[in-house]
Amino acid sequence: MGERILLLQTSWLGDVVLSTPVISALKKIYPHSFLATLTTPLAKPLVQYNPNVDLALTYDKNGEECSFISLVKKSRELRKLNFNIAFALQRSARSALLVYLSGIKLRVGFADSSLGWLYNRQAKRPVDKHDVLRNLAIIEPISQDEQNAELCLEFPKNFSLSPELLKLLESEQINLKEKKHYTLAPTSAWKTKQWSTDEYRRLAKQLTSRGSKIIVIGALSEYDICQKVTQDLPTLNLAGKTTLLESAYLIKHSKALVSNDSLATHIASAFKTPNVVIFCATSPAFGFGPWRNHAIIVEKEGLSCKPCSRHGGKYCPTGTESCMKEVYAEQVLAALDQLNLNL
């Protein structure tokens, strides 16, 4: 009888994508195991169709299950599933406490985790490597599979876009099978990771002047930003009109993606979609850049204040927003042309 394994990653959506190589590695080490993942409800579609995942569980830690009482209830739910090994990728006290209260015999976490002493096996997390390799280090005491580490995103069987979305694409004469359109993802959860909306618009204008088709994606809450990029241009603003998997599907079938340091970048890496990534307040040195993809990074160099933080912030600490505004559309367009030349 195989092991019953629980893999926890309840952080940001992009972090969940970057953790998918751990799923493959665990299944390789424990080929007969029952493997479950625990993510947020929003992130569930990113892992539930992975062929190596037997069960996708959710923990709404930022919503209905944010209280300590909910944590205890969740631990009781997990206890009933009889897991005997847990791997916790997030280094929070909540993750450590959750697996401890769940009564899981072997609890593996990172040595620098909050409440790390609740893990009975601690892995060293290599801070100077890409986050994919940092995640894989969770199983380093057992095995390491860096050479085969690939991001994995899968769609459900018979997946298709909604009729409404297909109609919008048809109205702009965009045929996804041809992979001739560009996708722009101009938003981010953090304002200082977001390239200038004006420059995104200038880029869109230059691309459409060449006859290129443009799709702009984002959440419903980001519609206004996307509208500023697309207004009065022959482009398609799909902000708030796609599910997470539909957005991923559009990226997969793009000629190239232009994005910030964000989830869209990691989706492009998963599908090997050519990608130009603009790093504003953050830096690829933090380990969250494109992973083994045909990608070019564009950023403002020579700023003494950059990078200002690991994940970006809501406001520029200097008030200049230089890292966001002093990267220009012409630079990104040149990077796109370079990608096309190298394909």
Image (tube, rainbow, N blue to C red):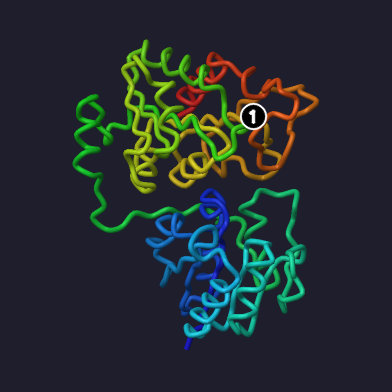
Residue in front for this viewpoint, 175 or 283? 283
x then y, percent, for residue 18:
55, 52
Please give left or right for residue 129 compared with residue 12 in the image.
right
Residue lying at the far right in this picture: please name it.
304
- Residue 90 vs residue 152: left or right? right
Residue at (42, 36) in percent of width and height:
218
Left or right of residue 105, residue 44 in this image: left
- Whether 239 is drawn above or below 236: the answer is below
Dividing the picture into quadrants, the one containing residue 317 is: top right
- In the rendered image, residue 324, in percent from the top left (x then y), is placed at 62, 24
Viewer-side residue, 130 vs 208: 208
- Which residue is labeled 1 in the image? 280
For label 1, the SS is loop
Q: Residue furthest top?
A: 209
Q: Which residue sits at x=36%, y=38%?
A: 240
Task: Identify the residue shown where x is 71% and y is 23%.
Answer: 319
Depth check: give the residue in front, 290 or 87: 87
Q: Position of residue 250 (x, y in %)?
A: 35, 38
In the image, residue 120 above or below residue 56: below
Residue 173 location in percent, x, y?
A: 22, 25
The quadrant where residue 311 appears: top right
